[in-house]
Image (tube, rainbow, N blue to C red):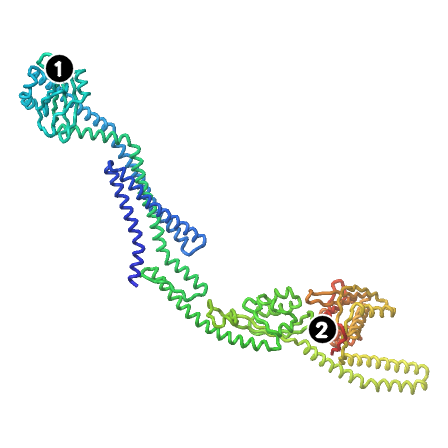
Amino acid sequence: MKIGRVKKHLRGIVPILVLAALLLISLTFMSIAIQEPSRFAGAYVVLGIFNAIALVPLGVLIGWNLLQLARQVKEQVPGARLTMRMVGIFVVLSITPVLVVYYFSMLSLYRGIDSWFEVHIEEALADSLALSRSALVMRKREIMKQTRSIASDLSDVPTFSIGDRLEGIRQLSGASELTVIAGYGQSFVASTLDPISLAPRHLEKSVLLQVRRTGLYLSLDPIANEGLHVRVVVNFPDPELGAEPRLLQALFPFTHRVNELTDSVEEAYSDYEMRASSRQELKGSFGLALTLVLLLTLFAAVWAAFSSTRRAVAPLRDLVNGTRAISRGDYETRLPSSGSGEIAALIRSFNSMTRKLARARDDTWRSRRQLEGQWKYLEAVLARLSSGVITLDHAQCVFKVNEAAHQILGLDLCAALGNTLTSFSDIHSHLRPLAEVVSEQLEGSGEWRHEVMLFGAAGRRILLCRGAPLVLPRAVPSQEEEHEPPDQTEELRPGHVIVFDDVTALIQAQRDAAWSEVARRMAHEIKNPLTPIQLSAERLRHKYLHKMAPEEARTLDNLTRTIVQQVESMKTMANAFSDYARSPQMRLRLLDINGLIRDVLELYRGAGADTPMETRLDSSLPELQADPDRLRQVLHNLVKNAQEANLVSGKSGIVVETRCAGGPAHRHIEVEFRDQGNGFPPDSIENAFAPYMTTKPKGTGLGLAIVRKIVEEHGGVVWARNNPEGGASMIMHFPVAPIGFDGEETGS
């Protein structure tokens, strides 16, 4: 483990050491170029090649890192923005001082180069050169005079004996060489200080020509390993008659010190001239070299900023990725931890947290499995219940429904899953009473019980609803997920369960049975005394009517007739009770309700009724499934009820209207009777269809009760309302005939 850490640190340090070595080598070449201008050209070439080799990979590496960083920022990679900010800070902190140093370095470099070429230095060098040249001229003149003097001394000496005197003269004069040449180069006699290094030399043709023309040749000749010498050639006469003039060549050396000073001055001046001629090139070369070093330094700093920033941000990026993995439910995420710093402590805390979350997830998963087992058991039970069951989640959205709920409500409730009952009832309006009751009850807490009446395609339904709070799992796994661990911790949520039963038939049967029993007993109790009363009245009338005085006979006749009429009325009432108590078997068939209404109203028009009757019948009404005789009784009762209401108010007019209501999936037929009476008292309109409830002095209270009973037997509903313009309306809703029904059916 430790060896791996050492290798990891070395991998991070080695590139930095290589960059430092490159910078050091570059600075070394820079120093050589500045300190030794004579070697600058070679150093500059090496420096340029080296910096180019170093800059190209660094530039490519930095460009690639910038592109990678831009892509990561665009893709929102964790740590990318932090890396960008830190790199920017590092680059600014490193570039600012480097640029300042670079500016002042270039300024100092240019000023230093300009200082090499100041005017007084140039004048001093020129004066030194002129002084040295003046000294040389004076020395050359002295040597020329001395040479002419030697030639004058030798003018009387014959050529064949001149060699004996020439050595002595050379030594006395201090010359390095004395050579006498006869016949302009044909023969010569010489005396030298060093016969090896200063061997006598022949005169060049140019020298001979100059001597013949001017009689004198004077020059400075450098001699290898001996320094500068003054060379003087003069002609002098030959004592022999008719002979050509002879030539004397003398070499006089300068002192060693003079040679050194002369060489130094010449070299300094030549170097100055060379530098002066290349001042701008020198500035450009030094500036370019310094710029290359600057670029190498900046590139190295930027690359070091990238490298160090990535190393610093890497643990934070790992933490971000680990946190995202935790948010996705991967609690097995573990981050590598090394070192003892704050980041390492944070990573260890993160790993400890993930272990605890994993344990908590496993505990929750086991609890959830137990709950799901209980939930599946409950679902199996609910699927076999005859009661409808709807479960709602914490947001009051439908979570589960059983098969009985589909059958009772006559709908496919799968479309309601995930939606609230209120929103679902906006599509299926006949469910609105149920949705309103549920929403109202859910505002409270605890169990509740309520009776709801719905009217849909299947007709009237009375539901007995019960509700209670329920704890629901977030999701129930499929069979494929049964043995897989969860991706994240599943929570348990509060919900609600609603259980409802269709008690329409039960309530109708109970009510019919109760009222039928009451009506049967009342009919029995009423009929029992009526027959003796009627028989007694008829017997009295038959026995005493002809035996009494006319006045008394008329009185007896009126009294007995009244008794018989009232007995008949009581019998009619008893028969009505019997009819209400009796539930004859219905014969259902397809029926055109508009045609039935026309037939019934035509009877009243034909009977000479003075009440105007208006019909507003919808010709597009579908047929309904009904017993014509029973519905005819309903229509008769409603017409009579409207006529009696009009008599009380003194007005006339009955309006009968039919229309098709409801949506495509829940169409039903609506029939409305409107009268011009005084309407129902507000305190009794709710009980208008209850048995024995009447507002008429001689009413039995059974007419509207029979209407309600027959309508409900047909699966419909009926209710009353007072109209704003006066009068009352009786409104009936009937379900349309089911598709496929085309025959006669017997119902109870």
For disc 1, the marked residue is 244
**Left or right: where 430 falls relative to 559:** left
Give residue 336's position: percent from left, percent from top: 36, 62
- Position of 576 with respect to 300 (left or right) is right
Q: Is residue 719 visible?
A: no
Q: Kindly identify the residue that appears in the image at 30 percent across and 57 percent down.
A: 9
**2 or 1: mark nearer the eye:** 1
At label 1, counting other C-alpha atoms closer than 10 Å, the crowd grade (few under 14, some 14-19, many 20 or more) is: some
- The reply to whether residue 51 is visible in this rendering is yes
Would you name the residue on which mark 2 appears? 715
Residue 655: % across, % down:
79, 65
In which quarter of the view is residue 654 placed?
Answer: bottom right
Instruction: Name the amino acid type tagged 1.
Output: Glu
Residue 537 against residue 649 in the figure, above or below: below
In depth, the one of 644 and 251 nearer the eye is 251
Indicate whether 104 appears above or below 405: above
Q: Which mark is residue 147?
A: none
Q: Of the residues under marks 2 and 1, which one precedes in the sequence?
A: 1
Locate the C terminus and report the quarter of the image it occupies.
Answer: bottom right
Report how far apart the C-alphas of labels 2 and 1 lie in the structure. Answer: 170 Å
Image position, residue 466 (x, y; %):
60, 74
- Quick check: 501 above or below 312? below
Q: Nearer the viewer, residue 357 or 155?
A: 155
Choose top left, top right, bottom left or bottom right for residue 48.
top left
Q: Quadrant of the N terminus?
A: bottom left
Q: Amino acid at mark 2?
A: Gly
* Structural crowding at the residue carrying mark 2, measured as other residues with C-alpha within 10 Å and reported as few (<14), some (14–19) or many (≥20): many
Counting labels gives 2
- For residue 450, side relative to residue 725 (left or right): left
